[in-house]
Image (tube, rainbow, N blue to C red):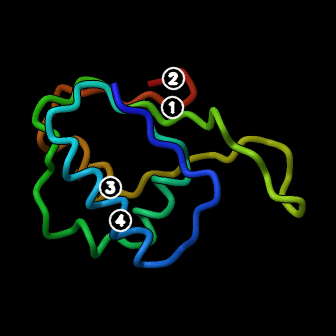
């Protein structure tokens, strides 16, 4: 199982590129857990993954969980809702069509 959490993310293309490079190295992962910020940054920079095939041939479960979410002072205290764009969903699931996505405990 791999758990990736961004505590102080930026919207920069360079940071998104670093995330994609890390994900490419996780091609054997079966259980992947991400916080919502990872999904948000990937959706902002879909051009980085739009021409790549999914590296996740063994993925069984993708969990989006805000576990470490700490709102900034100007943000509401509620957990952010994750909206996964189609390109990002395909990036994670095309290599493992039987994988399940869980968001805060729900499929």
Viewer-proximal residue, 43 or 10? 10
Q: Marks 2 and 1: in contact by CB < 8 Å? A: yes
Residue occupied by mark 4: 18
In front: label 1 or label 4: 4
The residue that label 1 is drawn on is: 103
Residue 80 horizontal/vertical position (percent): 68, 47
Give me the C-alpha separation between circle 2 and circle 4: 28 Å
Image x and y of residue 27, in percent: 15, 41
Residue mark closest to the camera, 2 vs 4? 4
Q: Which mark sits nearer the N-terminus, 3 or 1? A: 3
The relative height of residue 64 versus residue 105 in the rendered view (above or below) is: below
First in sequence: mark 4 or mark 3?
4
The mark that comes first in sequence, 2 or 4, is 4
Count residues near mark 4 (Cα–Cα under 10 Å), then give few for <14, some for 14-19, many for 20+. few
Q: At 35% across and 65% down in the image, what residue appears?
A: 18
Residue on which disc 3 sits? 88
For marks 2 and 3, the one nearer the N-term is 3
């Amino acid at each position: 199982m791999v758990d990736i959490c961004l505590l102080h993310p930026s919207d920069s293309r360079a940071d998104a590129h670093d995330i994609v490079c890390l994900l490419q190295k996780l091609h054997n992962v079966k259980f992947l857990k991400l916080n919502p910020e990872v999904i948000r940054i990937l959706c902002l920079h879909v051009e980085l993954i739009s021409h790549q095939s999914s590296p996740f041939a063994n993925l069984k479960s993708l969990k989006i969980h805000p576990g470490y979410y700490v709102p900034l002072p100007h943000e509401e205290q509620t957990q952010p809702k994750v909206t996964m764009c189609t390109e990002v969903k395909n990036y994670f699931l095309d290599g493992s069509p039987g994988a399940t996505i869980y968001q805060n405990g729900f499929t």
